[in-house]
Amino acid sequence: MISKYFDKNNLHHAYLIEGAREEVVPEILEVVGELGVKTLGNPDFVQITLDSFKIEDARNLKAFSQEKANTTSRKIFLISANNFLLEAQNTLLKMFEEPIENTHFFLIVPNASALLKIFASRFYIIKTKEGVELTQAEEFVRMSLSKRIDFIKELLVDDEEENPILDSTRSRALKFLNEVEYVLHKEEISRATLHTFKQIFKVREFLRMPGSSTKSLMESVALVITVL
């Protein structure tokens, strides 16, 4: 339960919640209901569910957030997205830096570390799960190069037609990249490993950019990892 993180008498203006939307959204709806804000048929409650949050979405959010509340003293925005594009984050920086009175945001993402640090710093951050399943990442860093390449192909199989909301190729790549980095940090640091960390950092930045090739970027990580 994440309700323990919310002080209903002194609600923070913006929460960043790392977790699975299908688990987190119902809990947020419950919290909002306890605040006396209706979640159905209420123009002051806005729920946005997207795979990628783009600059157009950011501009629309800014415009709508500046409108006065219609039915209550509060406006609530519940946003869940697998991927927040860099341009969208930069567009919203000032809005989250200068809180709007009686306006509260709940942003749900699968991986908070995929966001710009300066953007995430504007939020009260909640992580619903401590730790990650690392078995695949641990196996990955010990595979031969050919097996790592094959693994990347399987990891990035595009299933968006079947499940366009709950997952995306890019968000899976970012999540797995973080797990690989965590595993490497546990190992003895060598020059080769340090080079790998630098490449992971570069790949993470490029994965946030629209139009970049997820497969090519992840394969570049597979190429630089030294078998441990």
Image: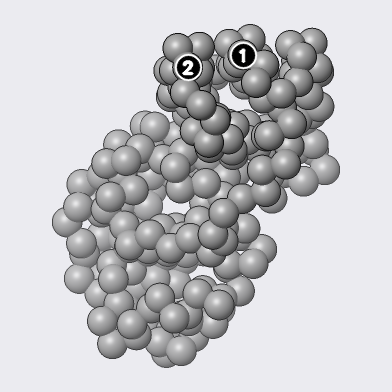
Question: Element under label 2?
Answer: loop
* Residue 161 visible in the snapshot: yes
Measured as percent of width and height from the top left, residue 188 is found at 51, 26
Residue 167 in which image quadrant = top right
Assign the C terminus to one quadrant of the image. top right
Mark 1 closeness class: few <14, some 14–19, many ≥20 residues within 10 Å: some
Identify the residue at image location x=79%, y=10%. Answer: 146
Q: Earlier in the sequence, mark 1 or mark 2?
A: 2
Q: Position of residue 198 (x, y in %)?
A: 43, 18
Specify whether 140 is left or right of 186.
Answer: right
Task: Identify the residue under disc 1.
Answer: 226
The foreground one among 134 and 100 is 134
Most extreme residue toward the front, as rendered? 188
Assess whether mark 2 and mark 1 are in contact (beta carbons under 8 angstroms): yes
The vertical placement of 101 against 119, above or below, is below
Nearer to us: label 1 or label 2 = 2
Q: Nearer the viewer, residue 228 or 116?
A: 228
Q: In the rendered image, is residue 59 in sight?
A: no
What residue is drawn where x is 20% and y is 71%? 101
Rendering coords of residue 73 (x, y %): 28, 82
Disc 2 marks a residue whose amino acid type is Ser
Which residue in the rendered view is the most extreme toward the left?
98
Q: How far from the left and from the top, in percent, is residue 169?
A: 67, 33
Q: Crowding near pointer 2: few (<14 within 10 Å), some, many (20+)?
A: few
Residue type marked 1: Thr
What is the number of callouts on the image?
2
Q: Which mark is residue 190?
A: 2
